[in-house]
Image: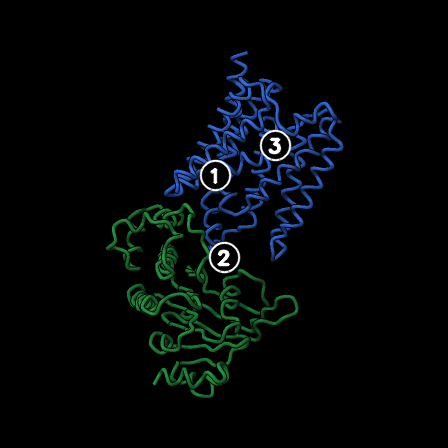
Chain colours: A green, B blue
Amino acid sequence: MDNVLLSVSDLKVQFDQQVVLDDVSFEVKKDQTLAIIGPNGAGKTVLFRAILGLIPYKGNVVWKKGIRVGYVPQRLSLEKDLPLTVEEFLSLKEKEKEKREKVLSLVGFDKEKDFSKRKLGILSGGQLQRILIAFALLGEPEILLFDEPTSGIDLSGEETIYSLLHKLQEKQKLTIILISHELQVVYRYADTVMCLNKEKVCFGPPQEALNKEGLQKIFGQETGFYHHHEE
Amino acid sequence: MITNLLFLILVGSMVGIAAGYLGSFMVLKKMSLVGDALTHVALPGMAIALTFNFSPTLGAFLALTLAVIGVWYLEKTSSIYPETLVGIFFTASLAIGLLITPEPDLLEALFGNLEKVTTLEGVLTIIVSLLFIFFTWLISKKLLIGIVSEELAKSMNISMSKYNLFYLLLVGGVVALGVKFVGTLLMGALVIVPAASAKNISRGIKDYYFFSAFFGLLSAVIGLALASILHISSGPAVVLTSISFFILTYIFKN
């Protein structure tokens, strides 16, 4: 029981009369990497927002007592000329310069010297994502919730994000819940996968959960494409 | 006369600093137009105060507080920002204010007046301005995280709606302090324009806060001095001064 960091049961979310999530139950254990997949509009981000308590829901969401949660939201829409530098953004959460520099190097920004003086608004999608991860890491989280943006990051950029997450998972003993759109990412980095399409459609280790049947349930005809990708 | 003018400028410059600093968040929150229109609500408050013989600043403050609570509530409960509604509501209060403000006081209420500040009022204004600056500084980090991402802030257990209300109340307060000098029609500019100018030339958030306050200060000092020397209304003098800074920084930026 001590190993369970998050336990969700009978989760239901509705906006006005429309049910967006229904009857979702799952558990996340320590050191697990859970990937949540599903088509657009399946309620993945809504699930995150509900378990973080950002929106009203019905059902039970129980976190381990006193747990530190880090949240990396989907891409932000920042003004290009927002007068806030990387350094200043991180210092909103952490006063000590050493700690800020440590997370910056953890997310791979130790080489470029003046990077921390750049404005947040001019960073590329991938860079901003890594800064948001750094921001989340400043709270020394035990569990990281990572909401992958649907598009916009080039593949090489995505590659680094996931190898980064993988590194963190090993180095920092982080438990991770991530929303992903790439089945390859799921196979490579997650030990558990949950397919979501308003309801929980499948759950388990990727090789078992993502059999042809499960994939068809969530992605319908696209299955062939994704499956082909994997083989 | 000269000491009186210097005292007025001192009072005005404190309001300018407070307005500039508070306004810096308004601009980042993309609430410039709301902030500008909000000041119109001061007029009916001042009119009622004049009619019942209590301080117009207090009247403006009460009216603005009500309006701020209204704006905050609408922002909190509607998924789309009810800009049109806010526009209608604020214009309505301006129209009502115009009708019920006693004729002799109308021009002053609209465009500001230099002469009518007593020592007590002046000292109080300085103290309250300092308090507003201090309170805003206290919540500045949380406001800024909320500006970057409201969700991020909420995920850190920051109750954004509480801080937003507190902040907007402070803005209402600083507007109430300023309407005396700048007038209810133009006070919005003193909240928005210094921050807009600062944004043109700032490399980071510290620059931005500093320049917002600094341009607020300069606009008040130069504007009030010009008004006194040229015998023109203080509101237009202050606002045009601040706008000339905006133009200069805009040219500098490009």
Q: Quadrant of the N terminus of chain B?
A: top right
Location of the C terminus of chain B (image quadrant):
top left
* Left or right for A56, reference B156: right
What residue is shown with label 1? Answer: B195
| First along the sequence among labels 3 and 2 | 2
Q: Amino acid at mark 2?
A: Glu
The chain ID associated with circle 1 is B
How far is disc 1 from disc 2 in space, using C-alphas?
25 Å
What whole-number distance in Å separates the C-alpha atoms at marks 3 and 2? 32 Å
Q: Position of residue A98 (x, y in %)?
A: 28, 49
Q: Residue at x 73, y 29 (%)?
A: B101
The secondary structure type at the circle numbered 3 is helix
| Dot 1 and dot 2 within a common chain | yes
Q: Which residue is mark 2?
A: B151
Observer-side mark, 3 or 1, equals 1
Does the image show residue B193?
yes
Vertical side of A204 occupied by A4: above or below: above
Residue at the disc numbered 3: B176
Q: Amino acid at mark 1?
A: Ala
SS type, badge 2: helix
Q: Say if mark 1 contacts mark 2, CB within 8 Å.
A: no
Depth check: give the residue in front, A140 or A116: A116
Q: Identify the residue at horizontal 57%, vertical 28% (top origin).
A: B236
Q: Earlier in the sequence, mark 3 or mark 1?
A: 3
Q: Is residue A140 visible?
A: no
The image shows residue B235, relative to residue A137, as above or below, that is: above
